[in-house]
Amino acid sequence: MSFSLRVILVAIVMVTMTANICCATDYNVGDSTGWNTGVDYTAWAKGKTFKVGDTLVFKCAVGAHNVIEVNKGEFEGCKATQGMPLTSGKDRVSLRSSGPKYFICGVAGHCGLGQKLTITDS
Ligand SMILES: [Cu+2]
């Protein structure tokens, strides 16, 4: 392989890596409504493409809600059995792997009222 071809290949790799870093997106879950009851998070997530490296930001009043990452069964049953709740009121969850993710609020009754979010990736 010639020197110039190698230079071009290295340049292509660097541009690709930079593109991945540049395009990580922070998503404010629920946008201006934040992480609350009475919000349709299915509608919020619809049409969005989530990628590894993106971050979900769950904003709510401290103590009013929390965020627990759960599995599909827990999500459907609104019952977290193992995840640790995030309670800062401005919790950031980075997407580190592909595949669906499931989140609920662990405050009694809130998940049943619709405070639950599932995302799929591209
Ligand atoms: Cu809640």
Image (cartoon, rainbow, N blue to C red):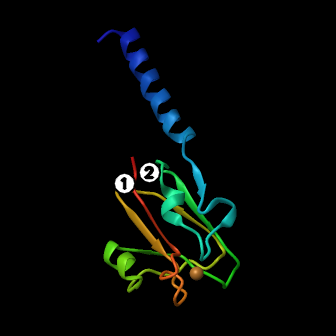
Whether label 1 touches label 2, CB < 8 Å: yes
Distance from mark 1 CB to nearest ligand 1 atom below 8 Å: no
Q: Is residue 116 above or below residue 53?
A: below
| Cα distance between the residues tagged 1 and 2 | 6 Å
Q: What's the mark number on residue 122?
A: none
At x 43%, y 23%, the residue is 12
At x 54%, y 67%, the residue is 40
Tell me the crowding category of disc 1: few under 14, some 14 to 19, or many 20 or more residues within 10 angstroms, Cα based: few
Q: Position of residue 79 (x, y in %)?
A: 40, 85
Q: Which residue is mark 1?
A: 98
Res 118 quadrant in image: bottom left
| Residue type at tag 1 | Ser
As helix, strand or loop, the secondary structure at mark 2 comes to loop
Q: Position of residue 46 (x, y in %)?
A: 48, 54
**Front residue of this view, candidates 87 and 79:** 79
**Front residue of this view, candidates 100 and 33:** 33
| Residue type at tag 2 | Val
Q: Which residue is mark 2?
A: 52
Q: Position of residue 70 (x, y in %)?
A: 40, 75
Q: Is residue 17 found left or right of 81 in the rendered image?
A: right
As helix, strand or loop, the secondary structure at mark 1 comes to loop
In what quadrant of the picture does the N terminus appear?
Answer: top left
